Image (spheres, rainbow, N blue to C red):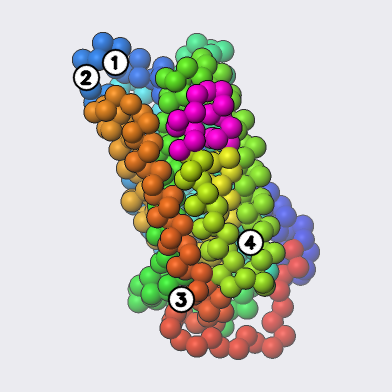
Amino acid sequence: MTFRDGKATGATVALTLLILINLFNYIDRYVLAAVISPMTKTFFPEADSGADESIQAKMGSLSTAFMVSYMLIAPLFGFLADRIPRWVLVGIGVTAWSLATGASGLAGTFGMLLFTRCLVGVGEAAYGPVAPTLIADMYPIERRGSKMALFYMAIPVGSALGYVIGGQVTTLMNDWRWAFFVVVPPGLLLGVWCFLMREPPRGQADAATTSRAAGMRDYLTILKTPSYTLNTLGMTAMTFAMGGMAFWMPEYALRRGAGALDEVNNYFGLIVVVSGLGGTIIGGIVGDLLKPKIAGAYFVVSAVAMALAFPLILGALYTPFPLAWGFIFLACFCLFFNTGPTNTILANVTHPSVRASGFALNILIIHALGDAISPAVIGAINDQAGNMNAGFLTVSFLCLVGAVFWMLGARYLDRDTARAPTSLDPVAAPAEAPRGASEPEA
């Protein structure tokens, strides 16, 4: 399989594999959220008595443990991905997190469960910063936004399937542990497939003029790129709000009488998959279409959608079910709308030789200050206030903060995109691309 010869087959197969892996990536993450209630009864049978007011914060820490290991290890794999074959790293990561997910179902104590979620984070860290760089090397800037959107559409689908699989398998087997067991075999098969893939040439879609290996100083210059920094700050605010609410939404709806556990997971899963698919794909297409017409278009469309999400979240909090599901659908659509554009920005404003490290650094920042802490924050606020609306309202303000950062970034995007492929120095003038440089036709 090659990418230089203009054949679309190789890139299509690679993109398909990456989408499937991303699908199971998010299934494995959100199976946990779907079974919080029965898991709480297993590890904290005293929860119903109200004797321990910190139980919800402890359950929220399961998501925090995953995110902490994921974000801390991601820079290491990003550094390695700039130097060794990336498909090998992806294969190792998929295999590792699949086995760790199965181990979560075997946990006999809460401490062991916490440890296995950390291992899932380590496995996903070998994949998260690497996959987007493979896509960037297969598709030119003009088509990259829509291809990134196809890749990231696996987020809502996988998240939804995680809720549905978790709820249905738990109900069918009358045991939450099976929700973790059933996702292991597909993950292992995808891991084996990765080892059979061939590496695309780095930077071929950018006609990059610098082929030397990047040094430590080159990595530090990533943060000097305004588009990268402002995009990362906006994504941090979005991740804080979205991650916390996504983790607790099934439990929140359950408490407000939206239905039984399996019904709530099915409703929310359907909403996430439909709104997420629509928002992610349409966001990527709109960003590509407006790119030649509006300066900083990727930033602009993301900021507008994020700002619109805030009043929709308020509507969901103060509208009774089942009408609240409508507001949740629209809010999810707006939150997912930025997924393709913002990740395309990361790819477009980083030089190919440091691109994986750029994604890894972004992962570290947005999760360290975002969804690594927001589930625990919502849980802690609820423990004190006795009302999950208070926690959701607190984190939803971050939607407006993210919109502001993205609007500020719009003025820099076109300039930073032009400079990235030709120089590792973000303040240097862009060099002229080599004449006759070809773009992959995949």
Task: Count residues near mark 4 (Cα–Cα under 10 Å), then give few for <14, some for 14-19, many for 20+.
Answer: many
Magenta segment includes 315: yes
Task: Count residues near mark 2 (Cα–Cα under 10 Å), then give few for <14, some for 14-19, many for 20+.
Answer: few
Exactly how many numbered labels are in the figure?
A: 4
Residue corresponding to mark 2? 52
The reply to whether dot 2 and dot 1 touch (C-beta < 8 Å) is yes
The reply to whether dot 3 and dot 2 touch (C-beta < 8 Å) is no
Q: The disc labelled 1 sits on which kind of residue?
A: Ala
Q: CA distance from mark 2 to mark 4?
A: 48 Å
Q: Position of residue 258 (x, y in %)?
A: 51, 19
Q: The disc labelled 2 sits on which kind of residue?
A: Asp
Residue corresponding to mark 4? 287
Q: The disc labelled 4 sits on which kind of residue?
A: Gly
Q: Secondary structure at mark 4?
A: helix
> Is 19 placed left or right of 395 in the picture?
right
Q: CA distance from mark 3 to mark 1?
A: 54 Å
> Is 205 placed left or right of 375 in the picture?
right
Residue corresponding to mark 1? 47
Q: Secondary structure at mark 2?
A: loop
Marks 2, 4: nearer the viewer: 4
- Residue drawn where x is 32% and y is 42% of the image: 373
Marks 3, 1: nearer the viewer: 1
Which quarter of the rendered picture does the N terminus lie within? bottom right
Residue corresponding to mark 3? 213
Quadrant location of residue 242? Answer: top left
Task: Count residues near mark 3 (Cα–Cα under 10 Å), then give few for <14, some for 14-19, many for 20+.
Answer: few
What secondary structure characterizes most of the magenta part? helix
Q: Secondary structure at mark 3?
A: loop
> Compared with residue 274, is residue 91 higher up or lower down, i.e. above or below?
below
- Residue drawn where x is 72% and y is 85% of the image: 436
Between discs 3 and 1, the one toward the N terminus: 1
